[in-house]
Amino acid sequence: MRTETIPLDETDCFSQFFIDYINQKKELAPFYTDFPTVENIQKTIQNRHFKDENRKVLVEVLNEQYQGLEISSAVSQNIEALADSKTFTITTGHQLNIFTGPLYFIYKIVTVINACKTLKQAYPDYNFVPVYWMASEDHDYEEINHFFFEGKKYEWTTDQSGAVGHFDPSGLKEIVDKLPKGAEFFKEAYSQKTLAGAGRAYVNHLFGKDGLVVVDGDNAKLKKIFTPIIKDDLFEHSPEKFVSKTSSALEDKGYKTQVTARQINFFYLDKGIRERIEKTESGFQVLETDISFSEEEMHSLINDHPERFSPNVILRPLYQETILPNLAYVGGPSEAVYWLQLKGVFDHFKTAFPLLMPRNFALIVPETAATKWEKTGLEQPDLFLSSENAFEKWVKANSDHDISYKEELKKLKELEGSLKGKAGEVDPTLTQHIEALHALFSKRIEKAEKKLVRAEKRLHEDRRRQIGSVKEVLFPGGSLQERKDNFLNFYLKDPAFVEKLLNTFNAFDYRMYLMYL
């Protein structure tokens, strides 16, 4: 298998905010601790102090969550190792998309597994456990109820509500029956009682041999550890203050922030319900319901039922870092950007801020698409141009006619200088008139060049279609492949697909991989 890498800032697929972080722009340095490198992990280990009693609770909960599921010795050993003070985690998180959702979900997990392997080699005295944190409490059903396979959208329809992790997934077995041979393991997964259980089952099937540990934060024992922060948010509203301060600082530097903290950053979570909690004059109200609490009742609820408090996007990262001995969080471009808004909250609660580690990025190029592209003579970075821009570049490079007016525009510029010199000797104010004439004629020449290019394009419609067909394979519907296609598009044709990713990706190489399969 042939692979190439391209710097992310040459793909035009990512925000400038994210690219500046990748390039370690000094303006962003105050918003994180260290950049994620193998060398910086040593310092992170030294600064990561995690309570032994919290480790004990974590191991107890994981053993409970894995009950009834056949697990590998690698998973079992990693769970038990979490009780050891020399064991740390590298974590990624994701929604409970059905059938894994978009391809980058797989890339996230491959990144954390490979990161742990690399770190174990670099620091053999420590243990590193790859973790997938299930966002089981999310209630954005519309975001997770579909996936794309072989150009078709498969969608799950259910009238269930509340946290998606609580949903009964049995209806998904009907979709499994429509898939080709090789996806049967999903049927067993969707025989679990909840969607969270199903997620753990199929992720364990795919990555259990690699020791990946799946954590579901929707748990009373784990949230008991988080109760001081729940109380602070509901009664003191500290997170809102610190996120607002950090967001303003980022915006002052010209960055557009992604998330906004609320006065209260928790949802009320119960069977069929995940709704925002809002402060009122008399206490607290759960929006869209008749549920309300006095301040005294709220204090009691936090102490007795912490599992009923579900953190939003502002506090979920802090919750994760409170219950895991974590060193780095692996996320996509949007995640890295919004985590940069949160360091002030971590500092306030005296919780170590993890290294923000971008996941691996990849473009899978099938052999047929690669062959077509090579025949065009276009370069690999040109794959990231739009179909029209790639075609125009090809036309300009391969036309039998001279369709560029570049030389003419250069001569016009020289003529402008000469005319301005003569006019300036007579009346300096006439130079502005010459500049206006130059601008006018330049625009007309550029317009004429565009017409000439369009005329030339019409002579090469076959090449346009060829470029367009490759682009549709790699950028389905105009979206980056990894953000739309499901991994089954490749896994069912090649059961070794995931293994090839594990053998190819370097977790600490923050570039785009081109993989020719």
Image (cartoon, rainbow, N blue to C red):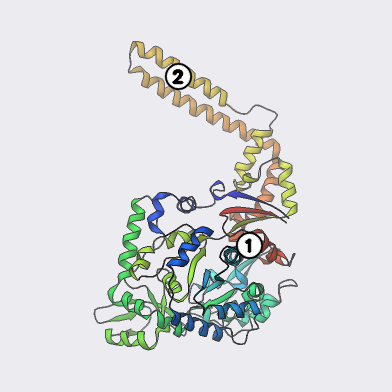
Q: Quadrant of residue 96?
A: bottom right
Q: Does 16 sit left or right of 262 as displayed?
A: right
Return the residue found at the far left: 281
Helix, strand or loop at disc 1? loop
Count residues near mark 1 (Cα–Cα under 10 Å), then give few for <14, some for 14-19, many for 20+.
Answer: many
Residue at position x 62%, y 38% from top?
Answer: 392
Q: Quadrant of the C terminus?
A: bottom right
Instruction: Give the vertical position of 87 relative to 420 (above or below).
Output: below
Instruction: Give the vertical position of 283 relative to 243 (above or below).
Output: below
Helix, strand or loop at disc 2? helix
Q: Position of residue 410 (x, y in %)?
A: 52, 23
Q: Earlier in the sequence, mark 1 or mark 2?
A: 2
Q: Quadrant of residue 195?
A: bottom right
Whether residue 151 is visible here, answered yes or no, is: no
Count residues near mark 2 (Cα–Cα under 10 Å), then give few for <14, some for 14-19, many for 20+.
Answer: some
Alpha carbon separation for disc pair 1 and 2: 53 Å
Q: Does 441 sit left or right of 116 as displayed?
A: left
Residue at numbered disc 1:
485
Q: Does 248 sit left or right of 319 as displayed?
A: left
Instruction: Give the vertical position of 463 relative to 486 (above or below).
Output: above
Q: Position of residue 257 (x, y in %)?
A: 40, 57
Q: Does 201 sit left or right of 421 as displayed?
A: right
Q: Quadrant of the N terminus?
A: bottom right
Q: Quadrant of residue 492?
A: bottom right
Task: Specify the amino acid type for callout 2.
Answer: Glu
Residue at position x 65%, y 26% from top?
Answer: 402
Taking depth in this image into account, of 352 and 369 the one nearest to the observer is 352
Residue at position x 69%, y 33% from top?
Answer: 398
The circle on residue 416 is 2
Contact check, label 1 and label 2, Cβ < 8 Å? no
